[in-house]
Image (cartoon, rainbow, N blue to C red):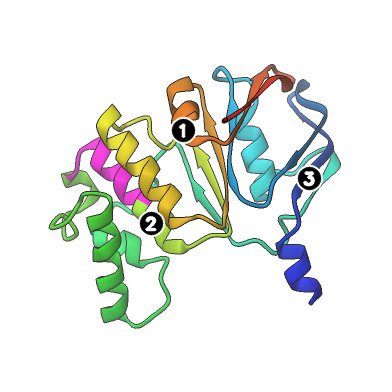
């Protein structure tokens, strides 16, 4: 019972402080996030958005403060870079996060590749794909992992507007009960995707205006 309750908790960032080489990126930063939907952290490059995501993911530790509500969540992190394994195929990159037998994993991977518009491309190595195609493989892999929390760091930068809109719709359809945290400096992406957008400045990170989708 307690594990379920933790999983359904809001994520809370309480009085976070983080410094790099004497530069303060987070200074007594606090924010409460919902259990599901899409929250956008919008701001210029270098203001500290990625640092926030990395702290939520546990990839970086804060100097002080705490983050609660993520301990029992399955996190799917879509980085700015595609981070594909270059020595295996697109299909194998997606299948790597699946846990059935090899045949089932391959079929499941092909399904996700088709959903991001890459049907028939599964046997190609990352080096044989364009930048936008590689990013779509990474998106397919992130969705196949089936997280309870999706951390999306500039995930659409390599996509044209039409493909971006299609992928945003796909993510919304496939993750209705999960929380998505989108980091971007493209306000059009925030308008398309986010339920709530926090306009950030910094460093250190500060919240200015909060925009809620009507």
The quarter of the rendered structure image containing the N terminus is bottom right
Q: What range is drawn magenta here? A: 129-139
| Circle 2: element type | helix
Q: Is residue 99 above or below residue 74?
A: below
**Measuring 40% from the left and 47% from the top, which residue is drawn there?**
83
Which residue does the numbered mark 1 point to in the structure image?
Answer: 154
| Circle 1: element type | loop
The quarter of the rendered structure image containing the C terminus is top right
Residue 189 visible here: yes
The mark nearer the N terminus, 1 or 3, is 3
136 falls in the magenta region:
yes
Looking at the image, residue 126 sits to the left or right of residue 35; the answer is: left
**Measuring 77% from the left and 22% from the top, which residue is drawn there?**
24
Q: Is residue 63 above or below residue 49?
A: below
Q: Residue furthest bottom?
A: 101
Q: Residues within 10 Å of mark 3 (few under 14, many from 20)?
A: some
The mark nearer the N terminus, 2 or 1, is 2
Q: Residue furthest left?
A: 120
Closer mark to the observer between disc 1 and disc 3: 3
Residues under labels 2 and 1: Cα distance? 16 Å
Closer mark to the observer between disc 2 and disc 3: 3
The mark nearer the N terminus, 2 or 3, is 3
Q: Is residue 158 above or below residue 122?
A: above
**Which one is nearer the viewer's eye here, 10 or 136?**
10
| Circle 3: element type | strand
Looking at the image, residue 126 sits to the left or right of residue 4; the answer is: left
Which residue does the numbered mark 3 point to in the structure image?
Answer: 12
List x then y, in percent, for residue 77.
52, 49
Which residue does the numbered mark 2 point to in the structure image?
Answer: 141
């Amino acid at each position: 019972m307690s594990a379920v309750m933790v999983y359904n908790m809001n994520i809370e960032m309480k009085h976070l402080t983080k410094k790099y080489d004497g530069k303060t990126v987070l200074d007594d930063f606090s924010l409460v996030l919902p259990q599901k939907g899409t929250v956008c952290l919008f701001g210029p490059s270098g203001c500290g958005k990625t640092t926030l995501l990395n702290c939520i993911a546990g990839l970086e530790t804060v100097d002080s403060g705490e983050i609660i509500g993520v301990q029992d969540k399955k996190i799917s992190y879509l980085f700015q870079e595609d981070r594909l394994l270059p020595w295996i195929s697109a299909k194998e990159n997606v299948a790597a996060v699946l846990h059935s037998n090899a045949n089932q994993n391959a079929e499941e991977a092909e399904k996700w590749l088709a959903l991001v518009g890459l049907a028939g491309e599964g046997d190609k190595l990352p080096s044989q794909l364009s930048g936008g195609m590689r990013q779509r493989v990474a998106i397919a892999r992130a969705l196949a992992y089936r997280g309870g929390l999706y951390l999306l760091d500039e995930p659409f930068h390599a996509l044209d507007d039409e493909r971006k809109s299609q992928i945003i719709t796909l993510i919304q359809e496939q993750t209705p009960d999960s929380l998505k945290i989108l980091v971007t400096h493209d306000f059009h992406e925030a308008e398309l995707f986010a339920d709530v957008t926090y306009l950030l400045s910094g460093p250190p990170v500060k919240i200015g205006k909060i925009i809620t989708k009507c």
